[in-house]
Image (spheres, rainbow, N blue to C red):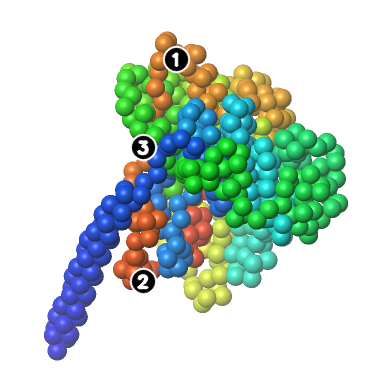
Amino acid sequence: MLKKFFLNFLSSFVGAWVALGLFCLVAVLVVIGLIGKAGMSAASTAESVKKHSVLVLELNGEIDERETPADVDYMSLMQGELNTPQTLTSLISAIREAKDNKDVKMIYLKCGGLSAGTATLHSLREELSKFRESGKKIYAYSDMMGNGDYYISSVADSLFINPEGMVSLTGLTATSMYFKDLLDKVGIQVQIAKVGTYKSAVEPFISNEMSQPARAQLDTLLNNVWGVMLGDMAKSRRLKVPALNKMVSDDYLSLKDGNDAVKLKLADKAVFERTMDQRIADALGVEKEKVNFISPSTLSSMVEAKQALKTGDNIAVLYAVGEIREGTKNGINCEVLVPVITELADDDDVKGMVLRVNSPGGSVFGSEQIAEALAYFQKKGKPLAVSMGDYAASGGYWISCHADRIFADATTITGSIGIYGMFPNASQLADKLGIHIQEVSTNPQASFPGLFKKMDESQMAQVQSYIEKGYERFINRVATGRKMKPSEVRVIAEGRVWDGKKALSLGLVDELGDLDQAIDWVRGKCEKGDKLNITTYPKVESSFWDVVKLSMQSEVNITLIKEAMKLTPDAEMATEVGNILRRKNEQAMMPGYKVTLK
C-alpha cells in the first residue's frame, strides 16, 4: 500500500514538473514570436535623424550609471509594468551626438519625478551646458518640478511650467531609519565592533536616533552639496545665491502655482503642454509638422554603431557600480571583476584604464581582492585613473586610493575611511519561537561567531582587535596611495564622509572632473593616446528578461509571463534579509543614507 502511494506521488510529481516545463517552453516561444512581430512593427516606424530634429529628454524616474542585465521586479511585473531606467552614459552620449549633429537643432527637456544622485545630475547638467555653449537652444517644460527636475531644467534657455503646476524647490534632506526598538521586539541583538567616530553605518541597528558626530558630518555634507547646486541654479536663472536660498527657505514654493513661479523668476512662462510643439516650431522657424522629435536611444545607438566599427589599441573604462559583495549578480562582485581586470592587464591592446566608481562600499574582502588586481594592472606599466560618480566611499575609496590620478565630481560623496563588524545574535528570537539550540563541539570556538549565541567579553575583544587591524590596513593603504603620512590620514578618516570639493582640499582626490577628463588624462599618459579607442567593461550580457522588457516597450502582451510568474515564489520581501546574510562580517560601508534629488 505504502509502495503504491509513493509510486502515485512520484508520478504526479514528475508529471507536474513536465507540465511546468512544457508550459514555460510554450510561453517562451510565444513571447519570442510576439517580440519578432513587435520588432517588425517597430522597424516600420523607426525614428531617424533628419532636418529640424529635436532631441526629447523625458527625464522621470531613476537614472542609472550604465546599462545592467535586467532583474525581475515582481510587483511591476504583476502590474504589467517593467520600465528600464535611463542611464547616464546613454543620455550623455545622446546629448553629445546632438551637439555635433547639424540636423539636431534643439533639446526639449520634459522633467517630472526625476530621482538621481547629485553627481549624476551634476554631470548631466554640465553636458547640457556644453550643448548650449555650441549655440543650440534648450527648452524645458514640466507640470510639477521637484529638486532634481528644477536643477536640470534651470539650465534651459527658456523654462516653461504648467499654470497649475509648481516648482517644489525645498533644499536637500537625508533620512535614515533606525531599527533598535524593532530588533528588541523580535529578539535580535546586533553586536558591533567598529573603528571611526563617524562610522555611523551601524547606528540604525544599535540606536533609535542619530548620533551627534553622524549629524554633524551629514549637516556639513548636505550644505556643501547644496551650495554647489544653488550656485548653478542661481547663475542660470540670473538670481543672487542668497536671494534664491531665502526663497527656498521662506516662500513655501511647494504651495505656489506656475504663475507664482514666473513672478519669482524661477520660470519664464506659464503655459499648457499642448502649446509646446508650436513654441518649439516657432523657435526653429518652421511649421509644426516639420519638427522631427527623436529620443535619446536614436542618437546613442548611432554612437554605439560608430564605436563598434573601431578596432585596435584602446583605453578600457571599467565600471564598478553598486555595493561590493561576493557571489551576487548585482553590485560589484570581486569574483566577476577581478578576472576582467587581470584580462585587461594582460591584453597588449589595452594601453590604460579608467575605473569608474559609483559605490558606497561593502565587503572588505571583496575590496581588497579588487585593489590587488588593480595593483597588478599598474605593475604592467599601464596608467590607471579613477573617475568617481555619486559615491566612492569606504570600500569604494579602498579600491580607488592607489590610482595614478583620482577625479571626482564636486558633489561626489567619498572618504568614509573606517570599517566595522556586525554580528547578529538571535538567541532571544529563538526563545520566543520556542526553538532550543543544542550543540556539541570539539573546541570552544567551533561555532564562533554564532547566530544564536551572544559573544562573551573575550570574544568581543578579539573581534574588536580584528577590526582595528583592518582599519590600520585601510589607513596605511590610503597613506601609501595618496603619498600621505598615516597620521595625516587619521585626521580625515574616522569613517567621515566628504563631498568631492572638500575631498580635493584634503588630498583625497586629485582633480574635480568627469569621466571624460579622466579618459583624457589617461590618453595623455599613453603613446599615441589621441588615436586610442574607448571600450567599456564588464560587458553587459543580455538576459531573457532584457528581451521581455524590450517586448513590453513594444506593447507585447504579457499575460503568459504573468501566469508563469505566479508559479515562482515571491522573494521580494526577503531581499534585504538575504543581502545582510550574504555580507561578510567585516564591512567597509558608508553610512546608510543616500543624498538623492527628488
Q: Earlier in the sequence, mark 2 or mark 3?
A: 3
- What type is the residue that disc 2 sits on? Lys
Frontmost residue, 568 versus 305 = 305
| Residue 28 visible somewhere in the drawing | no
Mark in the foreground, 1 or 2: 1
Q: Quadrant of the N terminus?
A: bottom left
Distance, label 1 to label 2, CA atoms, is 54 Å
Distance, label 2 to label 3, CA atoms, is 32 Å
Label 3 sits on residue? 539
Q: Position of residue 565 (x, y in %)?
A: 35, 67
Q: Position of residue 340 (x, y in %)?
A: 37, 32
Could you tell whether 335 is left or right of 233 in the image? left
Label 1 sits on residue? 530
Q: Position of residue 341 (x, y in %)?
A: 39, 29
- What type is the residue that disc 3 sits on? Lys
- What type is the residue that disc 1 sits on? Asp
Label 2 sits on residue? 566
Task: Tell me the element at label 3.
Answer: loop
Distance, label 3 to label 1, CA atoms, is 24 Å
Q: Which residue corresponds to the image point at 70% horizontal and 30% vertical from the top-left? A: 501
Could you tell whether 199 is left or right of 301 in the image? right
